[in-house]
Amino acid sequence: MNRAERNDARRHDGQPGHETAVKMIDSAGITLATQSFGRASDPAILLVMGATASMLGWPDEFCGDLAQRGFFVIRFDHRDTGQSTTFAPGQADYALEDMAADVIAIMDAYGLDHAHLAGMSLGGLISQMVALQHPGRVATLTAVILHRIWVDGTVFEPDVAPQMA
């Protein structure tokens, strides 16, 4: 991203101190595009999008509303998505664990000890992995639009019926 693109990426949602900016972050040899909304001094919420969807899947208005409600909002492009590092088809050599490590790298780059995580679809799975691997770094976890998980031919389905009774 050149200087003009960075300047174009800077916006303001109309609230004092609520400037938004794109920040490029290095994680294990790749570059992740991130964007923040709100005040860095507010509690952080990291929005983790699903597979093949850019951070723009979290609409500006949604992110701005969260910032106006007192959150420091960060959204980002996964590997192979949007403005982050992309690989030629069939050349990607990373796993979900690497994508979970990217979330921690983003938190570290923003100086966050912990954050609220909100994940959609694959982002929900990645957020769950982060919560399991780094429980002290996750203030709360919100996962939406999740599906069954297949691992080595075994289907894992959430058992939510007892909690809903």
Image (cartoon, rainbow, N blue to C red):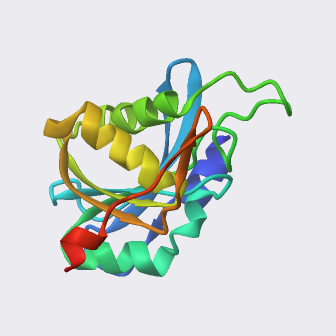
Which residue is pictured at 51% across the width and 19% down the height?
Answer: 28
Give the percent coordinates (x, y) of residue 160.
Answer: 30, 67
Give the percent coordinates (x, y) of residue 120.
Answer: 48, 62
Which residue is pictured at 23% across the width and 33% down the height?
Answer: 134
Which residue is pictured at 49% across the width and 74% down the height?
Answer: 60
Which residue is pictured at 65% across the width and 58% down the height?
Answer: 53
- Number of numbered callouts drawn: 0
User: For this view, does 158 lie left or right of residue 83?
Assistant: left
In the orientation shown, which residue stands out farthest toward the right? 89
Give the percent coordinates (x, y) of residue 34.
Answer: 49, 48
User: For this view, does 13 lie left or right of residue 16?
Assistant: right
Quadrant including the N terminus: top right
User: For this view, does 87 lie left or right of residue 24?
Assistant: right
Question: Looking at the rendering, which quadrant does residue 153 occupy?
Answer: top right
User: For this view, does 28 lie left or right of residue 17?
Assistant: right
- 100 up-or-down from 98: above or below: below
Question: Looking at the rendering, which quadrant does residue 17 occupy?
Answer: bottom left
Name the foreground residue: 4 vs 131.
Answer: 131
Give the percent coordinates (x, y) of residue 39.
Answer: 23, 61
Residue 12 is at least partly visible in this image? yes
Residue 113 is at least partly visible in this image? no
Name the foreground residue: 53 vs 161.
Answer: 161
Name the foreground residue: 87 vs 21.
Answer: 87
- 122 up-or-down from 93: above or below: below
Quadrant including the C terminus: bottom left
Name the foreground residue: 80 vs 74.
Answer: 80
